[in-house]
Image (cartoon, rainbow, N blue to C red):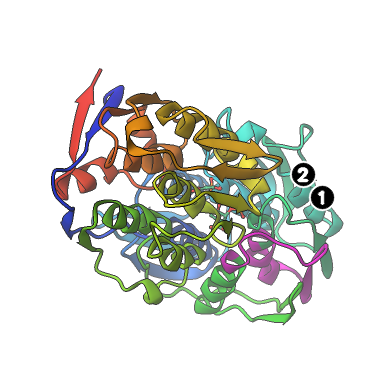
Amino acid sequence: MTDFVTIVPPARPIEGRVAPPGSKSITNRALLLAALARGTSRLTGALKSDDTRRMVEALRAMGVVVEEPDATSFVVTGTGRLQAPAAPLFLGNAGTATRFLTAAAALVEGTVVVTGDAHMQKRPIGPLVAALRSLGVAAEAPTGCPPVTIHGTDGFDGERVTIDAGLSSQYVSALLMLAPGGRRPVEVALKGDAIGARGYIDLTCAAMRRFGAQVEQRDLATWVVQPGAYRATDLHVEPDASAATYLWAAEVLTGGAIDIGTAPEAFTQPDAAAYAVIRRFPHLPPVIDGSQMQDAVPTLAVLAAFNATPVRFTGIANLRVKECDRVAAMATELSRLSPGLAVEEGDDLVVTPAAPERFGPARIETYSDHRIAMSMALAGLRVPGVTILDPGCVAKTYPDYWRDIAGLGVGVQAGG
Ligand SMILES: O=C(O)C1=C[C@@H](OP(=O)(O)O)[C@@H](O)[C@H](O)C1
Ligand SMILES: C=C(OP(=O)(O)O)C(=O)O
């Protein structure tokens, strides 16, 4: 990939068809559950990107057979057990793979080291490690972030675990997917009932049920999972809702019409809730609670820059522990387009739109964060001379992003 791309504002509204890739969240859940099941599962419509490749490589390192018959399918054959890997599992900056495999490592007989790149080594995992220990799993993460060492014993005896999911809902998903491997029913309880992106827990429960697990939600903060083996199954993965937000936003920013092949209400992922907000552009509400559609916040923040009135984003404190500190990154990068366009206020992001003549060309830092790259490129649909540095970082979840928007008639000039 080139060092940068410069976006050329389209002369006309963008019209056309493009299908976003498969859901990262569902693909990585399904890959793990298929690997834990005995037998062969076929996943179609799946995402193939850095994050899912990390998961696949880790599963292969634990003895799971994963075949790739075509560009969107995985055929996963498990034996019902994961083997201890010969080397640390390196998971790049894939939060889902890192958190889900840290918990699943309790089902291995032997030691597993879960680690990732420099960014991942700054993303907290302490609450998940503490929860595993309370279930009787020997695990340690001396820095509170990966690397994590787990001494698996092919199961665990604990029956109740309380988890502080304030920093990441992925801790809850990881524990839930591990839970059927326990020797007794397991109750997973939230410390407090506040949790960002509750919809990801629903996605986890749906995937678990699809693979034959019995999981029941008792109340807003408690789930009970019965012990039992996962069953191999075939699954068609729906498109990625977070990826869809860029296309929905491109549509309203240019007054165009983009057919993404899936109706907004057909998605089961939480970020699909962003559609209703996006359709209100240029009259976005003055306060947007981003807690239940976190990965869509960078997209919405770019739209806010061209809105009729200012927008405050609340409920986004945990965006600071994503691939980068997204609250700081969006404030800094939006303000390159027009000084003072976005500011941090506590953990909120406040975007105050500027008049069109006050926007100027800018080189946008992306901090190895696919969502900063993909969202800030949308500003280039309105502002001439928006250059996105390190455009290859989109490969984390949407490797064909630049090709797809170019296919809609947007000028994407590669350089470097
Ligand atoms: O469970 C999932 O698939 C995800 C949960 C969210 O993370 P957190 O739970 O860490 O907020 C989201 O940001 C991430 O992209 C995917
Ligand atoms: C936060 C994200 O990813 P993850 O936590 O899975 O690395 C994301 O895709 O925006």
Q: Nearer the viewer, residue 282 or 38?
A: 282
Name the residue located 65 percent from the left edge and 59 percent from the top edge: 196
Other residues around mark 2 within 10 Å, as few (<14) / some (14–19) / many (≥20)? some
**Residue 63 visible in image:** no
Which amino acid type is marked by label 2? Gly
Q: Which residue is mark 2?
A: 126
Report the magenta residues as a range: 173-200
Query: Is there a contact, CB below 8 Å, between mark 2 and mark 1?
Result: yes
Which amino acid type is marked by label 1? Ala
Residue 241 location (% of width, % of height): 41, 61
From the viewer's perspective, is 298 left or right of 359? right
**On-image quarter of the N terminus:** top left
**On-image quarter of the C terminus:** top left
Q: Secondary structure at mark 1?
A: helix
Residue 194 location (% of width, % of height): 75, 63
**Is residue 160 positioned above or below 321 on the image?**
below
Name the residue located 38 percent from the left edge and 56 percent from the top edge: 282
Q: Which residue is mark 1?
A: 130
Other residues around mark 1 within 10 Å, as few (<14) / some (14–19) / many (≥20)? many
Q: Secondary structure at mark 2?
A: helix
**Is residue 305 positioned above or below 43 on the image?**
above
Residue 210 location (% of width, % of height): 50, 78
Q: Nearer the viewer, residue 90 or 394?
A: 394
**Which quarter of the picture shows residue 182?**
bottom right
Residue 116 location (% of width, % of height): 57, 35
**Is residue 58 positioned above or below 257 on the image?**
above
| Magenta residue check for 187 | yes
Name the residue located 30 percent from the left edge and 57 percent from the top edge: 252
Name the residue located 24 percent from the left edge and 68 percent from the top edge: 261
